[in-house]
Amino acid sequence: MVIDTKAQEIVSIIFGIFLVTTGIYISVYEPAWVSNVYGAMLGLIGAGLALILIALWEYKIRKSGEVKEDERDYRIAEKASFRTFQIMFILQGFLFATLGILNIQLPAQPVVAALFAITGFSYMGFFYWYRTKM
Amino acid sequence: MKNNIKVWRAKNDMTQEELSKKVGVTRQTINAIERGKYDPSLELAFSLASFFDCRIEDIFAYEQQKE
């Protein structure tokens, strides 16, 4: 399947601008339906800026004609994803069972944030580990 | 999979960097293939064969994995 890189970059930038604008809107108008204005603002602006910067970085690489990633990276990503999936599956299963047995109720937001962070760090760690092995 | 890319590179007096630019991959990928750490895709194998103007079998040889 051929992915149109140019279209992907444009969509990323538009979506990034949308997220940043929404973040700014929330911080300025503080709408009643948002329970945590500061968190929502930081999350949306951060995600939006990350999307815009990644798209601009990819555009720069494409224009320079330099090869920064190639097929080896896809094989590495495949392995890193699978290992991350295994870890997350075991960890979440263990957490779910423990919380159920001990009847512990945790606040959703920090738990989701922790799982999100573990997923990201696990993937990055495995990616670089497999890269050094290959 | 065994390969003799290094020999073909030497015949053509090329560095890994030069070859990688010709076939559109990174130098690290050429290095990984030469060291036998990575088996290239069919597309890259064809690109290499086409670049060296030879058959794929002249570069790559299948080697049975040890049990």
Image (cartoon, grey):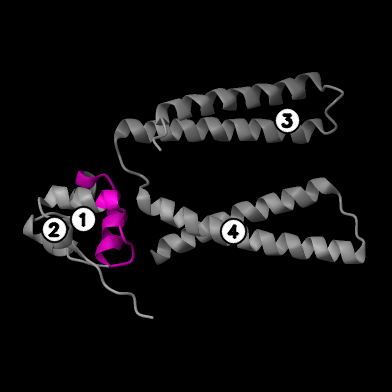
For mark 3, does the 10 Å Cα neighbourhood hold few (<14), some (14 to 19), or many (20 or more) residues? Answer: many
For mark 4, does the 10 Å Cα neighbourhood hold few (<14), some (14 to 19), or many (20 or more) residues? Answer: many
Asked whether disc 2 touches disc 4, contact meaning CB atoms under 8 Å apart, the reply is no
| Type of the residue with mark 1 | Gln
Q: Which residue: 23% across, 50% down? A: B20
Comparing marks 4 and 1, which lies closer to the viewer?
Answer: 4
Which chain contains the residue that carries disc 1?
B
| Type of the residue with mark 2 | Arg
Between the residue at mark 3 and the residue at mark 2, the CA separation in whole angstroms equals: 54 Å
Q: Quadrant of residue A102?
A: bottom right
Between the residue at mark 1 and the residue at mark 3, the CA separation in whole angstroms equals: 47 Å
**Is A61 positioned to the left or the right of B13 in the image?**
right
Residue position marked by numbered label 1 in the rendering: B16
Asked whether disc 4 touches disc 1, contact meaning CB atoms under 8 Å apart, the reply is no
Q: Residue A84 carries which label?
A: 4
Residue A63 on image: x %, y %? 33, 30
Between the residue at mark 4 and the residue at mark 3, the CA separation in whole angstroms equals: 29 Å
Discs 4 and 3 lie in a common subunit? yes
Discs 2 and 4 lie in a common subunit? no
Q: Which mark is residue A41?
A: 3
